[in-house]
Every structure is written in C-alpha cells, then in structure tokens.
Image (spheres, grey):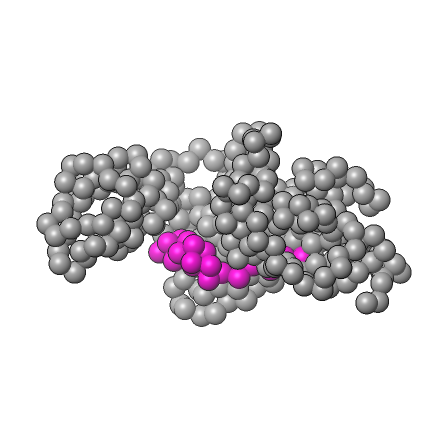
C-alpha cells in the first residue's frame, strides 16, 4: 500500500491525472480502473476519476500484484520492422490474433513475442510481459508497436490517448467511391442486435475517419485511411455504413468477393510516433501483403483514370 499527502502544488488536479504523476508505473487508464475497483482511495473513501484533490487529502494506492502470465512462448516467425531495447515494431500477418483470448490461446502475436523477447516485455496493467500498447483485428495486417519496458508503455499509451500517434491504413473497398477525399464523423458503440459487432450509435463514442482515394477500378476503390480515434472495428464500420464495405469483410458485409479473400483487405501501412525514450520522430511502414499486391495487379487492367 502506498500513501501520498496532497500539497498546495496539486490542488484541484483530477485524481486520475495525478496518479501517474505520483506513481510513474501507473497509466491514467490503469488509475481509472483502480479507482473504479476501490484500490485507490481518498481519505479512505472511494472517489470518481473526475474527483479534484484538496490540500491534505490522503491518497492510498493498493498496487495489484503482477499475475504471472500463463501464455506459452511459441517459436513463431515475426516480421520485425524495427527493434531496440525499449520497443519492437512488427508487421503483423493477416490471420494472427494479437492477444490470447477465448478460442485463441496459441499462435498469437503475444505468444511469438514472449518467445522472441523473453522477459523484456512491459508489465503494465497487472499482468507480466504482455507489452501490447494498441491492437489490430485478427484479419487486419500491418504495423503494430510493442513496449519492452514500462516507461515506454506509459509514454506510448499517453501518445495514443492524446491522438499524437498517426496511423495510416490501405483498404480495398467494394464500389466506386465518388469523393476524392472525405471525413466520416459517426459515433460507434456496441451493436444492440449482435454484441460481437460494433455499430453507429448516437450514444456511442466519438469516432472520426479520414480517407483519400488512391485508385479507382471497375467495381472497387483503393483508399488511404487515417483515423483520429481508435474505436473497435472503426474503419470497417464507417466504410460499410457509407456503402463501401472492405473487400472480404465477413462481419460488416457478406464477405463474398471474386478473389475468394476471407477477411477484410485492410492493412496498417504506416505509423508515425515519437520514440518514447529517445524523443526521435519515428515513421515506420509495412509493405502490403503479397496477396494484396497480387489482387491489385489483377485489377490494374480495370483501372478507371479519373
């Protein structure tokens, strides 16, 4: 149990913002979770994350013990785009789940990372060595950053939360998109009809997607997509909602396509961020998967020049 007495310098600061200042190993998101669970108390009382601290408040923090992960390290080849002692950036293959969950306990990115990085992955969030800062859907390929120390994890999490990480995707969609570029601003929430899906919901979380047409083909359009927010299935939901579902998407379209592709043709092509330790500006790109390139070659003779 850790205890802190609030002085004049921190008066009126939100408690969820103050906790990461008091304890560098706790992120703001972790602080919010600990507050909700009653593991962070103010004067022995449970408070909301929005509580503004007062002089002489006593903040008690019960640090949860790190649970030794039961995830099994597996010798799975990884396409490493960049690595140093603080972070590793991987080009995730389509079909690979990021983190073990129901139905996918092996063969995941984390299983592969545990084999490659051993004990060097970060332990933020009460579980040893997961290292995952952000995620990609199973069938979305491309760039993903993994933290190898807690300091890097905290910094990257804050960059993502503050929209300082720029993510650029390449998507092949059904239909010929008329606008050369546009912004989709529609809130997203859990579908009320199918809890495994997301949907446009006026009471959902803010979600903003920008896209630009790269090429048009007969029946298809190649898009470059940037996201301001990182909602679950955001790009897939937004593009499907405006009438241009991603080719192969089995959830937000019927999935049928002439190329017999299963799973969305969505690739996380580029990520731009500030290195969490050195402060260097990083730009890392992952080449399109071979199957994606092959399909674009097939479509080249159906190119529409406009």
On whether residue 58 falls in the magenta region, the answer is: no
Q: Position of residue 74 (x, y in %)?
A: 54, 40
- Give the position of the N terminus as an image quadrant: top left
- Give the position of the C terminus as an image quadrant: bottom right
What residue is shown at x 49% (from left), y 36% (from top)?
72
Front residue of 250/180: it is: 180
What residue is shown at x 81% (from left), y 43% (from top)?
257
Residue 30 versus residue 222 in the image, above or below: above
Task: Single out the residue that lies furthest toward the bottom.
Answer: 280
Task: Single out the residue that lies furthest toward the front.
Answer: 202
Quarter-of-image position of residue 8: bottom left
- Residue 289 as seen in the image, left or right of residue 298: left
What residue is shown at x 68% (from left), y 40% (from top)?
252
Q: Position of residue 259 (x, y in %)?
A: 82, 45
**Stretch in magenta:** 151-170
- Residue 122 as seen in the image, left or right of residue 243: left
> How many circles with numbers are drawn on the protein?
0
What residue is shown at x 53% (from left), y 57% (from top)?
228
Front residue of 11/131: it is: 11
> Does residue 291 appear in the picture of this structure?
no
């Amino acid at each position: 149990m850790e205890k802190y007495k609030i002085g004049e310098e921190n008066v009126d600061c939100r408690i969820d913002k103050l906790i990461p200042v008091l304890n560098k190993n706790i992120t703001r998101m972790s602080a919010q979770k600990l507050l909700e669970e009653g593991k962070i108390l103010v004067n022995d009382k449970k408070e909301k994350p929005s509580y503004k601290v007062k002089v002489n408040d006593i903040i008690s923090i019960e640090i949860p013990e790190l649970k030794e992960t039961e995830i099994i390290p597996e010798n799975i080849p990884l396409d490493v785009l960049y690595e140093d002692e603080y972070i590793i950036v991987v080009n995730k293959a389509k079909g690979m789940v990021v983190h073990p969950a129901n139905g996918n306990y092996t063969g995941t990115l984390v299983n592969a990372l545990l084999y490659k990085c051993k004990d060097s992955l970060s332990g933020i969030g009460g579980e040893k060595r997961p290292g995952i800062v952000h995620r990609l859907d199973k069938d979305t390929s491309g760039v993903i950053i993994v933290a190898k120390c807690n300091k890097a994890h905290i910094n990257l999490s804050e960059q993502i939360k503050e929209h300082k990480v720029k993510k650029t995707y390449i998507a092949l969609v059904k239909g010929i998109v008329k606008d050369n570029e546009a912004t989709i601003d529609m809130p997203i929430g859990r579908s009320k009809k199918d809890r495994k899906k997301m949907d446009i919901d006026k009471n959902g979380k803010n979600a903003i997607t920008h896209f630009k047409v790269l090429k048009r083909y007969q029946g298809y359009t190649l898009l470059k997509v940037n996201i301001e927010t990182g909602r679950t299935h955001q790009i897939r939901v937004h593009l499907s909602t405006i009438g241009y579902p991603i080719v192969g998407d089995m959830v937000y379209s019927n999935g049928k396509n002439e190329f017999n592709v299963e799973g969305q043709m969505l690739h996380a092509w580029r990520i731009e961020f500030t290195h969490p330790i050195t402060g260097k500006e990083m730009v890392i790109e992952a080449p399109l998967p071979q199957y994606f390139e092959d399909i674009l070659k097939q479509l080249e003779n159906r190119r529409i020049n406009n």
